[in-house]
Image (cartoon, grey):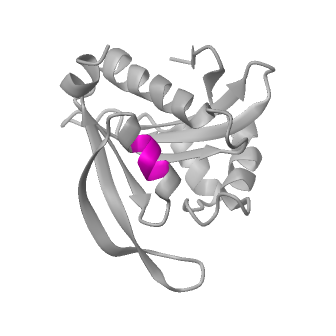
Amino acid sequence: MNSIKSTKIYLKKALLDDIPYIMNSERDKNNCEYVSQWSEQQHIEAISSHDKEEFIVYDNNNEKVGFIILCNISNINKSILIQRIVINKKNKGYGREVLGLIKKLCFIEYKTHRLWLDVKDHNFKAKNLYESEGFITEGLLRESSKESDGSFCSQYIMSIIDREYLSNL
């Protein structure tokens, strides 16, 4: 699938030319404390992979507003990881729209059984959004992520199962 859309946004598969935008988004001061930063080579490998997908998020004016990375697309256990969601234009409802499109893509198109993610314990806004979109907290990985200042933070593991998603259609 090359693109998928809602009323507010559409997702289009990332190209190698999109890597500078993706890397700048990861490193933006409003995003970097919540998401990991990959090297250019890691993004090249993800875009070229059969098991990962990177999408650019566009608004209705065809302006880039964020990106997404999905991993384990061909996982034998049918469990896809949302590796990263970054929205650069905050407070416009794009995050909720993105989650809706990702769930539709993963459960309807890819026929996955489980969609999961991790979220840093201090990212309250994202955790609340995930919960409101049907994701269940499975547990806490204590001090599992090293921060840029050398400290460690914990991460919640959250997921939604296909039957939970399909029962709310």
Q: Position of residue 20 (x, y in %)?
A: 76, 49
Q: Which of the pair 90/81 is nearer the observer?
A: 90
Q: Position of residue 100 (x, y in %)?
A: 46, 25
Residue occupying the point 73% across, 41% down: 89
Q: Is residue 29 left or right of residue 52?
A: right
Tell me where the magenta segment starts and ends, as one range: 126-130
> Height in image: 3 above or below 115?
above
Residue occupying the point 48% across, 39% down: 49
Q: Quadrant of residue 90?
A: top right
**Figure disc tally:** 0
Q: Is residue 144 left or right of residue 137?
A: right
Confirm whether the magenta stretch covers residue 128.
Answer: yes
Q: Quadrant of residue 79?
A: top left
> Height in image: 116 above or below 151?
above
Confirm whether the magenta stretch covers residue 114.
Answer: no
Q: Is residue 19 left or right of residue 42?
A: right
> Height in image: 118 above or below 7?
below
Residue occupying the point 20% across, 35% down: 76
> Height in image: 20 above or below 48?
below
Q: Position of residue 98 (x, y in %)?
A: 54, 30
Q: Position of residue 139 (x, y in %)?
A: 23, 59
Residue occupying the point 43% across, 75% down: 153
